[in-house]
Amino acid sequence: MNPGTCLIKSAWIAAEVGRERSERVLVVETYIAVSPLEPNYDAARYEAIVAEVQRVLAANPSLDRASILSMHRDKACLSLFRAQPAAA
């Protein structure tokens, strides 16, 4: 596993239901800060997360949108959205 590219802690599907429509929302929890105001914000790592989430949305048309949450720790973890398994 390459810790530099394994940034996603967990993900799940949330159903958001309104009076006239419902949405399937991919919720992604990461270990990086989402705001440039955070002391551990890393723009390159955040862009990698966004690219992975966009890839998953494109590959799964049943998902309507995604939300990215953040855990403010600098820990590596297994990416749930990797197209190919990471090398050991």
Image: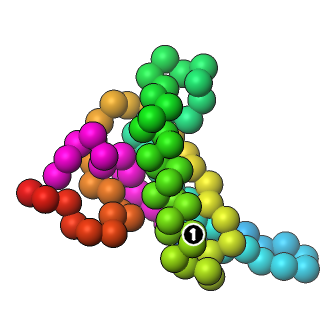
Neighbours of disc 1 within 10 Å: few (<14), some (14-19), many (20+): some
Task: Tell me if I can see residue 31 in this picture.
Answer: yes
Residue 83 position, x and y percent, is 33, 69
Identify the residue at horizontal 30%, vertical 46% (top origin): 5
What's the residue type where badge 1 is placed?
Answer: Leu
Q: Quadrant of residue 32?
A: top left
Q: Is residue 71 above or below residue 6?
A: above
Q: Is residue 39 left or right of residue 6?
A: right
Check the image and tell me how it is coloured.
rainbow
Q: Is residue 67 left or right of residue 41?
A: right
Identify the residue at horizontal 90%, vertical 80% (top origin): 20
**Label 1: element kind:** helix
Q: Which residue in the rendered view is the most extreme toward the left? A: 88
Seen from the viewer's position, the closer of residues 7 and 87 is 87
Q: Which residue in the rendered view is the most extreme toward the right? A: 20
Identify the residue at horizontal 46%, vertical 49% (top origin): 49
Residue 68 position, x and y percent, is 57, 50
- Magenta stretch bounds: 1-12
Identify the residue at horizontal 77%, vertical 77% (top origin): 22
Instruction: Tell me the quarter of the image containing the C terminus.
Output: bottom left
Residue 36 position, x and y percent, is 59, 24
Q: Is residue 3 left or right of residue 29?
A: left
Residue 8 is a magenta residue? yes
Q: Is residue 32 above or below residue 39?
A: below
Q: Is residue 85 above or below residue 73?
A: below
**Which residue is denoted by mark 1 in the rendering?**
57
Q: Quadrant of residue 35?
A: top right
Residue 55 is a magenta residue? no
Residue 57 position, x and y percent, is 57, 69
Seen from the viewer's position, the closer of residues 79 and 16 is 79
